[in-house]
Image (spheres, rainbow, N blue to C red):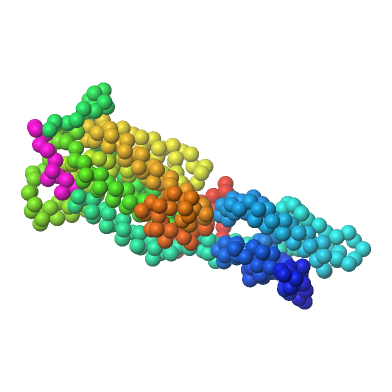
């Protein structure tokens, strides 16, 4: 039966089901329009797909915090009042309540104004709020094509990096003419020959641990997209800083490859060798000089720790502390090997952490994804790229994990949602 549920705008009532718990997303949208909240229908109805049950359970905290994040206080208070009134009307005048009471019977009406009371009433009515896979995908869509584009961007920057190093190598002054610059760290610590190998092993350990976390993360395509965009941007910035300021070698121990004086074929071969060897000295692929400001090894050691810390379960303190310690040891060994100036490491750490934190702050708050005159971070050159990548991601990425392969079936049927428990699905 359709009845008017006291939803009027301009004196014109619309007809909605008296049972709000049976409202669809479209019904919620109509109710919000009639109540004057049409500017939030896209956020609550289209993006978050609220039905009647979800609408009744909304609290002021839900509306204020991510992923909804309503920032206009007046609208927030009016919407909370409207939901409270709707909640009151629903459970006061609801007919045929299963426990035998009715709105017109002798029993006192059921009234639930607090979220806790609402939960109990909904349990009595056998109404359950189920977060289905479809709803989760609506909040955090994989959008693999965006990840593919980000991966192309990442690979392009990885290829550009050795090309720039080849160009810079030709400009590095001979150490007999331009000796190493003074560095405070070098004054206090003598060079340790094997230290740079330890640094690269530390980077590989953290990279392997990040790969495992990524492999098990339910929203791995979003995580991979973010990694590619952030690291790709960092290496683009590194190409610029290396090119504009060429520093002399940090130590007299450097044995730089001979200069080839514009031989493009030889430069291309060197670049490909370096790229396929991952730019590591222990693979024998890096004998070029000049790639100092800023340190690419510090970038990898720092960014792998930050991603592991962000996307692994919060309670895995041992993993977090171990990866932090590995990163610190690796960065210290860079300096101990005298393969980078201290300024190279400091700048790399500063740029890496700030870009990671700024990106994730923007991604975790819906309001910050839209440019505005007061939103100064929206003026960064990479913000349009960020909006395309994160436009449909609904807030903070949940720490959910699942076995991605169809075998073994025992693992495939288990999904972990880190709230201190694991559950079978």
The image shows residue 408 at horizontal and vertical percentages of: 45, 60
Which stretch is magenta? 165-177
Q: How many marks?
A: 0
Residue lying farthest to the bottom in this orientation? 1
Q: What predominant SS class does the magenta segment belong to?
A: loop
Q: Quadrant of residue 85?
A: bottom right
Residue 118: % across, % down: 74, 56
- Closer to us: 84 or 304: 84
- The front one of 127 and 358 is 358
> In this image, 199 relative to 56: left or right?
left
- The residue sitting at 32% across, 43% down in the picture is 299
In the image, what residue occupies the spot 19% across and 37% down?
A: 247
Where's residue 128, x and y in %?
Answer: 68, 62
Residue 194 highlighted magenta (yes or no): no
Q: Is residue 175 magenta?
A: yes
Instruction: Kindly tell me whether residue 62 is visible in this rendering.
Output: no
């Amino acid at each position: 039966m359709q009845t008017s549920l006291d939803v009027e705008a301009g004196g014109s009532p619309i007809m909605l089901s008296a049972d709000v718990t049976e409202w669809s997303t479209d019904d919620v949208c109509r109710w919000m329009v009639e109540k004057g909240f049409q500017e939030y229908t896209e956020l609550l109805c289209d993006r978050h797909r609220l039905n009647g049950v979800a609408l009744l359970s909304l609290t002021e905290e839900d509306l204020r915090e991510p992923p909804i994040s309503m920032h206009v206080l007046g609208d927030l208070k009016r919407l909370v009042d409207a939901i409270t009134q709707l909640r009151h009307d629903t459970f006061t005048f609801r007919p045929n309540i299963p426990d035998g009471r009715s709105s017109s019977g002798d029993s006192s009406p059921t009234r639930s104004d607090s979220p806790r009371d609402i939960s109990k009433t909904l349990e009595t009515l056998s109404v359950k709020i189920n977060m289905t896979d479809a709803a989760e995908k609506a909040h955090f869509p994989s959008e693999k094509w965006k990840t593919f584009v980000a991966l192309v961007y990442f690979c392009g920057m990885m290829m550009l990096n050795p090309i720039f190093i080849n160009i810079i190598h030709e400009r590095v002054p001979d150490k007999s003419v331009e000796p190493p610059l003074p560095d405070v760290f070098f004054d206090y610590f003598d060079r340790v020959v094997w230290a740079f190998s330890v640094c690269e092993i530390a980077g590989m350990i953290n990279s392997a641990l990040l790969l495992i976390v990524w492999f098990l993360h339910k929203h791995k395509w979003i995580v991979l997209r973010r990694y590619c965009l952030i690291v790709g941007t960092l290496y683009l910035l590194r190409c610029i800083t290396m090119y504009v300021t060429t520093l002399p070698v940090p130590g007299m121990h450097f044995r730089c490859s001979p200069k080839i004086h514009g031989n493009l074929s030889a430069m291309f071969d060197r670049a490909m060798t370096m790229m396929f060897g991952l730019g590591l000295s222990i693979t024998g692929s890096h004998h070029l000089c000049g790639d100092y400001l800023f340190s690419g090894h510090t970038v990898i050691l720092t960014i792998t720790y930050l991603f592991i810390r962000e996307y692994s379960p919060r309670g895995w303190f041992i993993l977090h502390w171990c990866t932090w310690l590995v990163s610190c040891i690796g960065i210290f060994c860079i300096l101990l090997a005298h393969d980078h100036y201290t300024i190279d490491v400091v700048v790399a750490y500063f740029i890496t952490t700030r870009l990671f934190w700024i990106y994730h702050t923007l991604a975790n708050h819906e309001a910050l994804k839209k440019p505005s005159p007061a939103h100064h971070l929206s003026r960064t050159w990479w913000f349009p790229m960020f909006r395309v990548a994160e436009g449909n991601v609904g807030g903070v990425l949940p720490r959910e994990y699942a076995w991605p392969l169809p075998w073994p079936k025992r693992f495939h049927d288990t999904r972990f949602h880190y709230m201190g428990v694991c559950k079978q699905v």
